[in-house]
């Protein structure tokens, strides 16, 4: 039995990791003014420059049913089954679109609402790859992946609230107060949606160090086999520090990635997060 793994471009993995874990992606669409391209063609740096110049956010469009139909049919010509890991249904209509298409494919495409984003999705997809390589059947793989969904720890500390304000995810008063007092909020994915947890003040190194320490203290039962440090436009020494804290905590494999265009459209420039599964490696 051949089982393929699929995700939208919001999985935020570079090509080398997509190839390593044999994950096939289908892209979101990004619009900057009168220019519309797929996620990956328009880059995060182009998005940041556009927002700085115009004061407007890009528009993101979910993967539509036609894209999914084409994508899934192509994969089904190579695999007996496909497991698709979708961006949280609370953040995008992509998951619902995928389900509608899969409902006409005789059970050969299974959709998992990851209730998370970015490399939080990748953690589940990589786990699925491990199970496939062990020879587990499709039902067992889907069941085991779904059981880990509530334990995905995805959070980040963002530079300011400007992108969240422009996107309607915080009030003008919240943005004003945060910018006035140079507050750096921690944004956490909770039950598939985004929520603010802690607030930080200070220079980059101090803020990121405290954020990582707080996260590891709050989510203290991680699967230490793998973690991600995912960022936008942070200098290497800051990312190095986050990686070191994870390594000192006992994580065996730490992957460094850059948030893609879809996720960057919401979090903005200078965002960093540490992601892992907080279930003690209960696989």
Image: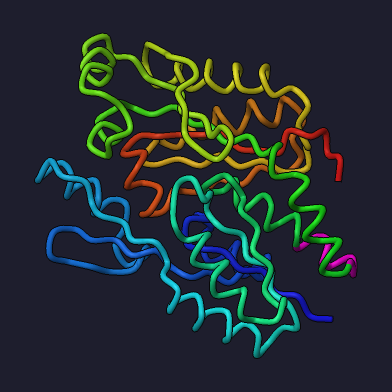
Q: Position of residue 279 (x, y in %)?
A: 79, 34
- Say which residue appears at 53% left-offset and 59% top-offset: 95
Q: Position of residue 211 (x, y in %)?
A: 53, 20
Q: Position of residue 206 (x, y in %)?
A: 46, 15
Q: Look at the image and give the residue range highlighted in magenta.
A: 129-136
Q: Is residue 3 left or right of residue 111?
A: right
Q: Is residue 202 left or right of residue 282?
A: left
- Say which residue appears at 71% left-offset and 38% top-offset: 277
Q: Quadrant of the N terminus?
A: bottom right
Identify whether 93 is placed above or below 24: above
Identify whether 276 is placed above or below 170: below
The answer to if 3 sits in the magenta stretch is no
* Magenta segment main secondary structure: helix
Name the residue nearer the viewer: 260 or 143. Answer: 143
Q: Position of residue 160 (x, y in %)?
A: 30, 26
Q: Is residue 247 left or right of residue 62?
A: right
Identify whether 197 is placed above or below 1: above
- Say which residue appears at 50% left-offset and 75% top-offset: 68
Residue furthest toward the left?
Answer: 54
Name the residue nearer the viewer: 256 or 90. Answer: 90
Query: To which quarter of the image does residue 104 belong?
Result: bottom right
The answer to if 133 sits in the magenta stretch is yes
- Say which residue appears at 50% left-offset and 37% top-offset: 193
Query: To which quarter of the image does residue 246 belong?
Result: top right
């Amino acid at each position: 039995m051949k089982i393929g793994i699929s995700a939208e471009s919001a999985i935020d993995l570079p090509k080398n990791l997509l190839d390593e874990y044999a994950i096939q992606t289908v892209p979101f669409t990004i619009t900057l003014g009168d220019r519309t391209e797929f996620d990956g063609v328009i880059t995060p740096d182009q998005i940041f420059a556009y927002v700085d110049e115009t004061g407007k956010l890009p528009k993101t469009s979910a993967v539509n049913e036609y894209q999914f139909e084409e994508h899934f049919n192509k994969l089904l010509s190579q695999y007996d089954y496909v497991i698709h890991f979708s961006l949280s249904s609370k953040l995008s209509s992509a998951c619902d679109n995928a389900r509608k298409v899969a409902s006409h494919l005789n059970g050969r495409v299974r959709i998992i609402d990851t209730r998370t984003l970015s490399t939080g999705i990748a953690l589940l997809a990589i786990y699925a790859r491990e199970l496939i390589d062990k020879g587990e059947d499709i039902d067992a793989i889907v069941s085991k992946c779904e059981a880990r969904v509530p334990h995905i720890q995805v959070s980040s500390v963002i530079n300011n609230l400007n992108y969240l304000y422009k996107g309607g995810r915080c009030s003008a008063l919240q943005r004003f107060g945060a910018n006035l007092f140079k507050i750096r909020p921690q944004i956490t994915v909770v039950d598939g949606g985004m929520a603010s947890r802690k607030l930080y003040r200070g220079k980059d190194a101090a803020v990121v160090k405290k954020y990582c320490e707080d996260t590891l203290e709050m989510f203290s039962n991680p699967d230490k086999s793998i973690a991600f440090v995912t960022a936008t436009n942070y200098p290497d020494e800051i990312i190095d520090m986050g990686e070191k804290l994870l390594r000192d905590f006992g994580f065996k494999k730490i992957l460094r990635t850059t948030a893609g265009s879809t996720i960057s459209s919401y979090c903005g420039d200078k965002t960093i997060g540490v992601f892992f599964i907080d279930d003690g490696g209960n696989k």
